[in-house]
Image: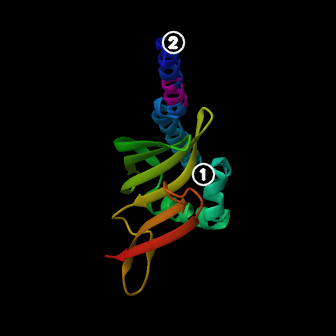
Amino acid sequence: LSRRTIALVLLLGVAAIVNGCGGMFKGKAAAEQSIAEFHKLYNQGDLNAIYSASHPAFKGATTDKQFLEFENAVQRKLGKVTGTVNAGFNIRSFNLTTTIVLNQNTTFEQGTGTEVFTFQMNGEKALLVAYNINSMAPLWSTPAARIRPSVWFTAGSYEDGIAAMCRARSSRA
């Protein structure tokens, strides 16, 4: 092979990598902006807007009624968000799809919680694909026990990107 051919192949390879990973460079900032918007809408009580702006896979995994019911319970027990700090992140790019996971330590008016947001890049915007909150504050009271939720609203997995699921898991106090 000639030098020119080798150089062209290398140039095309680098261009393909940069193009395929472009969302990774913008992903964290876009996801942080989406979290700020999520918390703003949450504090305003505009939960329908959060659901409407989410990724179609999220909507396929949970109904608006389920999401609104859960978020209303969070609002009743924890109140509004007063602050949030990034506790870690992960960015993956697979098959030209960039997925960003941000862990947030969030302070509410009446407690604290750890939120896990999963976003998928859609152009310049990070769309919510999964949401999880863990809090020591009980969201529901039962006569026998207080239940601390660990609720995931999620769609698919990194590997298959197809299956949709909504799994709710509770642990007893």
- Percent x, y of residue 78: 43, 58
- Percent x, y of residue 132: 45, 58
- Percent x, y of residue 65: 66, 66
Residue corresponding to mark 1: 45
Q: Is residue 116 left or right of residue 75?
A: left
Identity, as a three-letter code, of the amino acid under mark 1? Gly
Q: Is residue 34 left or right of residue 146?
A: right
Considering the whole magenta stretch, tell me its main secondary structure. Answer: helix
Label 2 crowd bin: few (<14), some (14–19), many (20+), radius 10 Å: few
Residue corresponding to mark 2: 4
Q: Is residue 17 magenta?
A: yes
Give, as a single range, the part of the protein colored magenta: 13-19
Residue situated furthest front in the rendering: 1
Rounded to the nearest angstrom, the CA distance separating label 1 from label 2 is: 60 Å
Nearest the eye: 23 or 5: 5
Nearest the eye: 161 or 36: 161
- Residue pictured at 56% horizontal, 62% vertical: 72
Q: In what element is the residue under mark 2?
A: helix
User: Looking at the picture, does residue 145 appear above or below residue 19?
Assistant: below
Q: In what element is the residue under mark 1?
A: loop
Residue situated furthest top in the rendering: 4
Q: Is residue 128 magenta?
A: no
User: Looking at the picture, does residue 155 appear above or below residue 146?
Assistant: above
